[in-house]
Image (spheres, helix red, strand yellow):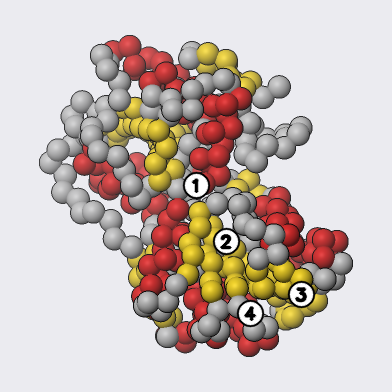
Amino acid sequence: MPHITTSQGVWDLHRYPFRENDPLRAWDAADEYLLNEVATLTPKIETPRLVILNDSFAALSCCLHCFRPTMISDSFISRQALKQNLGGNQLPTDSVNFVDTLNYPEGIYNIVLIKIPKSLALLEDQLLRLRPHLTSDSTVLAAAMAKHLPSTAVALFEKIIGPTTASLMRKKARLLISSYDAGLETAQPEPACLNLDEFALKLVQHAGVFSMNKLDQGSRFFLEHRQKLPPAATIIDLGCGNGILGLVVAGMFPDAHLTFVDESYRAVASAKLNFETAYPGRDADFTVTDCLNGFKNDSADLIINNPPFHQQQTIGDHIAWQMFRQSRKVLSSGGQLWVVGNRHLGYHTKLKRLFGNCELVAGNSKFVVLRATKH
């Protein structure tokens, strides 16, 4: 059973979406390291005010729910994991306050727990947003599995927060302890800019959004073959990132209604900024959700998709599989799903199994663009 035993209690925790006999745990040794440190720290603080960043499957938030912490995350999936694991442990749904990483709550925090993300740009952005909520009485604890800890993480904490020390490794996890330095001068984060002259677009995007500083190769290959797309009245950019696919396709079909979907709050916010800049006054929808949860069946003519092949640090195809299954339901009769992906991932097999057909639109040594039609 997926139970974690901590100083705070014993908890039944699962990854989201829940899968029977999932071999992967909802926590790691870095979570355990942080929980052990909190157990020694909280008795010394009269009124602990706790904030938790990047709690992938809400393990920290659930174990520490008695402090009524604030959980800050960019992930809708993490938000669903919080609901799932609070409910699974019969904990009050309002015992943890969830906010996304663009909307930090007001006030000062005296304990901050951070699971260090893969993206250093995201970490820098988060630390800059966090700093105004700290004082000399605040303690910042950050952890990661040692193999995923960026070599420059300590320097980044010292640049933005203050003096930082790295702990000894415990169960292959590393802990950073940072204290607030009031004398440091920092600026608030700004979205990054990316000029794509070939598409007459200037994109902005928040830190941590996929392919931040350049157009990724898969999206570029897809757009090289965009003229083969069928006309469509309703189009969904599924897993939209900064919105590049939908933005270019919107220019091809000026009367189409676009919907941009991602599980990242920062991605959808970036796509919204970019669409409003490129097409002022034009309506579009922007939705943060898990794949296509909540979308009506038979409601889209065309879905374009550059699916991820990992969740957090774990590589797998279950997200792509969910995207394909839900796309078949959401497409109207005769509607098409267009997918770009690495050739070796074998998406054509899954699409043919689901749709009964799959055509190769284009391919090179690394990528394929595939088309599946709902009949």
Where residue 61 sits in the image (x, y, percent)? 46, 28
Percent coordinates x, y for residue 195 in the rendering: 39, 78
Identify the residue under disc 4: 232
Q: Mark 4 vs mark 2: give the one in front.
A: 4
Residue 220 drawn above or below residue 4: below
Looking at the image, tell me whether mark 3 or mark 4 is earlier in sequence order.
4
Say left or right for 274 vs 211.
left
Report how far apart the C-alphas of labels 4 and 1 lie in the structure.
30 Å
Q: Quadrant of residue 188?
A: bottom left
Specify the label residue 75 is tagged with: 1
Q: Which mark is residue 239?
A: 2
- Tell me how far mark 2 sits from mark 3, CA to CA: 22 Å
In the image, residue 325 lies at what x, y percent?
74, 57
Indicate the amino acid at tag 3.
Gly
Question: How far apart in space, not on screen, are marks 1 and 3 (Cα)?
Answer: 33 Å
Residue designated by label 3: 334
On the question of residue 330 being in view, the answer is yes
* Residue at image location 76% in from the left, 32% down from the top: 21
> Mark 2 falls on what kind of element?
loop
Seen in the picture, residue 214 relative to 179 is either above or below; the reply is below
Q: CA distance from mark 3 to mark 4?
A: 11 Å
